[in-house]
Amino acid sequence: MATHFEVRFRHDRHLLRTTLRATRSGWRMLYGVYAALTGTAIVFELAQGEVPSAATVAFFAGFAIVAYNASPRVLARRMERMHRKRFGGELPEVEARFSDEDIRLNECRNEEHFDYAQVERILVREGIRLLVVTGRMVIPLPDAGFAQGTPQAFDAFIREKCPQAKVKRKRNRR
């Protein structure tokens, strides 16, 4: 079984934040929108000389807390901390190998195999490709991590292997 592409990476905070930003769902962003709208209502009431209701203040605080905790920056920090704890303070290198038969992920002594039919979406961002596998698993493939093959050749390869997958290209947000 010949490996066509090999990508190496570590689950560091930057990679996790980029992955979370690219794959976050709309409901997480809605908490921030609700917090902003509620905050605007509070400011409007204060500008009119009225005291905001306790319910309005409670909604604002609740939405703001949830929006903060659901932000990619906070989630990435928490995920990296948990990953370091799991592996004794170190972030182990992950190897993603792509052959004609399957996708193999190796992290320490853990090895997982995925069939190309399990890839539902391919997200292409500046400097990274993200494979969304059945369920909620995301395989990040940073361009700098390609040890075998190139990102451009990988794009053609993965499209051939995963014709059912939806491809989304987008520029990174800062």
Image (cartoon, helix red, strand yellow):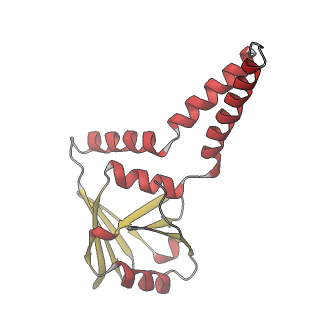
Quadrant of the drawing holding the N terminus: bottom left
Foreground of the two, 116 or 144: 144
Provide residue 153's location: percent of width, then percent of height.
37, 85
Provide residue 86's location: percent of width, then percent of height.
28, 42
Tell me if I can see residue 59 in this picture. yes
| Residue at figure coordinates x 45%, y 80% from the top left | 158
Tell me if I can see residue 136 in this picture. no
Provide residue 164's location: percent of width, then percent of height.
58, 79
Rendered position, 95 above or below 109: below
Q: Is residue 94 left or right of residue 53?
A: left
| Residue at figure coordinates x 50%, y 58% from the top left | 22
Count of number-bearing discs: 0
Provide residue 14's location: percent of width, then percent of height.
35, 52
Instruction: Give the image quarter of residue 121.
Output: bottom right
Rendered position, 28 above or below 102: above
Foreground of the two, 118 or 65: 65
Q: Is residue 154 left or right of residue 160?
A: left
| Residue at figure coordinates x 52%, y 76% from the top left | 117
Instruction: Give the image quarter of residue 139.
Output: bottom left
